[in-house]
Amino acid sequence: MEKAILARKVGMTQVFLENGMLIPVTVLEAGPCTVIQKKTTENDGYEAIQVGFGELKQNRANKPQKGHYEARLGNTDISPHKVLKEFRLNNIGQFEVGAEIKADIFNVGERVDVSGVSRGKGYQGAIKRHGQHRGPMTHGSKYHRGLGSMGPGTTPGNVKKGKKMPGHMGARNVTVQNLEIVRADSEKNLLLVKGHIPGARGGLLVVKSTVKVKK
């Protein structure tokens, strides 16, 4: 069964397992997410569910947002959400419009893939951005953190495509695969995931069942 939920990164801490081992975990505020719409092959050409996460005040919702909720849910009392996202799952029949997806959709020990936007680090050189080695620092060397050779001069006379150069670093969508769920609390809407997860505190994350299934 494929599972998915939207979450926000709270921060990192550490917990003790039953065997006494101390492990680092990332705390996620996972859900609750409301199923807003179900898309089918007959109507939309593909199967997916649309979920909302993070309540938005009624006075901050515009008319298209209110109309979308009224048409799909038939209830204007439900507060719109800050984030709407689709999940293409192979078992959308198990989800009903208006139902809530909570943190306990995942079980302890289950493996997940977490996607988020990494921290932006601005313009960086080749050493920090790509891990290249610096030049010698002594014996009269005047070339320390430069980019190095750009390739042949006359032939072909241009920089090869894909050359690792300085530039903007971070602020990219990153997925960390095969992470283990350590704890799941539906009352507090918390997921504790072993290891690190991309992004800053408060960043939006997508938690899905891992594609790396153990055989």
Image (tube, grey):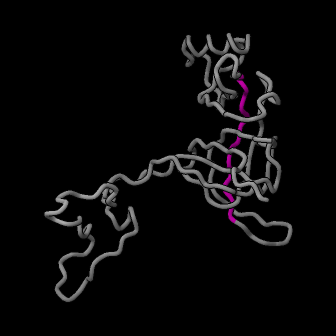
Is 113 magenta? The answer is no
Given residues 163 and 180, the one toward you in this image is 163
Q: Is residue 105 above or below residue 70?
A: below
Extreme-right residue of the structure: 18
Residue 78 x, y percent position in the rendering: 71, 18
As for residue 28 lying within the magenta part, the answer is yes
In the image, residue 85 above or below residue 210: above
Q: Indicate the position of residue 127 as horizontal and vertical percent values.
A: 35, 68
Dominant secondary structure (helix, strand or loop) of the stretch shown in magenta: strand
Q: In this image, 92 relative to 69: left or right?
A: right
Q: Is residue 131 above or below residue 185?
A: below
32 or 112: nearer the viewer:
112
Position of the C terminus, as image quadrant, is bottom right
Quadrant where the N terminus is found in the figure: top right
Query: What range of the chain is rendered magenta?
Result: 24-38
- Image point (54%, 14%), residue name: 62
The percent position of residue 11, horizontal first and vertical second, equals 62, 53
Q: Quadrant of residue 139?
A: bottom left
What residue lies at 69% left-to-right and 11% top-to-bottom?
A: 76
